[in-house]
Image: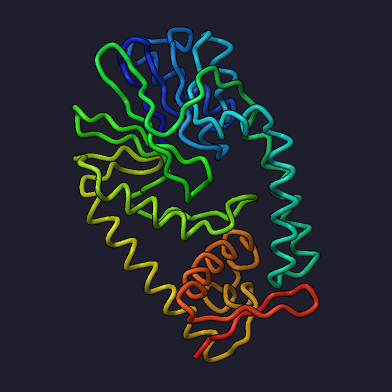
């Protein structure tokens, strides 16, 4: 993942990397190469709640005394990291069972998720941000925009003067950000597409991304993402028209094979997001029997 150092006053770090010794060592080495230390940090900005972006925040803040800025909802999530993660895992297991994943598989994947919790950590945000707020550094202003979809707390930071957007995982060049279903964020893809429409209208030349290379044509990439999601929705409605009614897990297995088993929650989020589009358009119908949901084509 990418973390960004803004050499301004205060010295600012955007995202931290995961909670690991290797990540911390690498961060310290890169800071030294630029004449800085962790103790020099004055502000840490967090783009969203995923563990690879927030895991070291608390360690860095304690060592440096830096302020921590995060969207209000993200600040609440960080403060109760373990409780929120446990509740999310419970929600994910229920969702998998409801959409056709076998109980032993759902239980095993929940155990895997619990094992990954150590890569993240709780943290205290000293600055709670809201849509439209400004982070004022000595030489620049970053305007705060909430762009939920990939996660409920995705936040992007716009430097209007430099026509620059710090985008976290909102937009990534080499892969489509997976809109993950979580508690209170059930229509993740619908929400994400609306967020992308708002970002597309922004006047920026460069998007600094949470993974991979920067994006220099954000409007073109977003249009490509729109086409990709339309194509995937078309494949899903064709599948349920040919073979339905099917559970979301059965659709995922048909589309991705064994990946649908090893990454059941990710592929479920992908299928259910596109089914939401089909349901909204009247192209699919949802049926429930014995607590398990299946989908069929409306026509």
The N terminus - image quarter? top left
Q: Quadrant of residue 268?
A: bottom right
- Name above or below for residue 278 compared with residue 174: below
Q: What's the coloring here?
A: rainbow
Taking depth in this image into account, of 110 and 224 the one nearest to the observer is 224
Residue at the spot 53% in from the left edge and 45% down from the top edge: 152
Q: Quadrant of residue 77?
A: top right
Residue at the spot 72% in from the left edge and 34% down from the top edge: 82
Q: Quadrant of residue 136?
A: top left
Whole-percent x, y for residue 282 in the image: 49, 79
- Tally the numbered discs: 0
Taking depth in this image into account, of 114 and 74 the one nearest to the observer is 74
Looking at the image, residue 42 sits to the left or right of residue 201; the answer is: right
Residue at the spot 36% in from the left edge and 39% down from the top edge: 167
Residue at the spot 27% in from the left edge and 60% down from the top edge: 223
Whole-percent x, y for residue 154 in the image: 47, 41
- Name above or below for residue 224 compared with residue 198: below
């Amino acid at each position: 993942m990418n973390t960004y150092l803004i050499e301004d006053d205060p010295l600012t770090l955007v995202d931290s990397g995961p909670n690991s010794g290797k990540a911390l060592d690498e961060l310290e080495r890169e800071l030294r190469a630029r004449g800085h230390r962790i103790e020099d940090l004055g502000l840490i900005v967090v783009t969203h709640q995923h563990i690879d972006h927030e895991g070291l925040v608390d360690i860095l803040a304690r060592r440096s005394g830096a302020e921590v800025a995060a969207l209000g909802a993200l600040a609440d999530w960080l403060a109760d990291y373990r409780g929120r993660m446990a509740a999310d895992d419970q929600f994910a297991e229920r969702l998998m069972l409801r959409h056709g994943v076998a109980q032993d598989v759902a239980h095993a994947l929940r155990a895997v998720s619990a094992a990954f919790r150590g890569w993240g950590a709780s943290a205290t945000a000293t600055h709670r941000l809201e849509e439209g707020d400004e982070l004022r550094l000595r030489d620049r202003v970053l305007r705060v925009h909430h762009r939920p979809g990939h996660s409920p707390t995705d936040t992007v930071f716009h430097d209007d003067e430099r026509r620059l957007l710090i985008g976290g995982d909102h937009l990534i060049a080499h892969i489509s950000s997976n809109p993950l279903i979580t508690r209170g964020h059930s229509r993740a893809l619908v929400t994400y597409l609306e967020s992308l429409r708002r970002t597309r209208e922004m006047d920026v030349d460069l998007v600094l991304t949470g993974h991979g290379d920067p994006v220099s044509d954000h409007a073109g990439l977003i249009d490509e993402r729109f086409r990709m999601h339309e194509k995937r929705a078309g494949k899903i409605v064709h599948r349920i028209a040919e073979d339905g009614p099917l559970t979301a897990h059965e659709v995922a297995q048909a589309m991705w094979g064994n990946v649908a088993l090893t990454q059941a929650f990710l592929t479920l989020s992908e299928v259910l997001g596109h089914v939401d589009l089909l349901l909204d358009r009247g192209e699919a119908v949802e049926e429930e029997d014995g607590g398990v949901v299946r989908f069929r084509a409306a026509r």
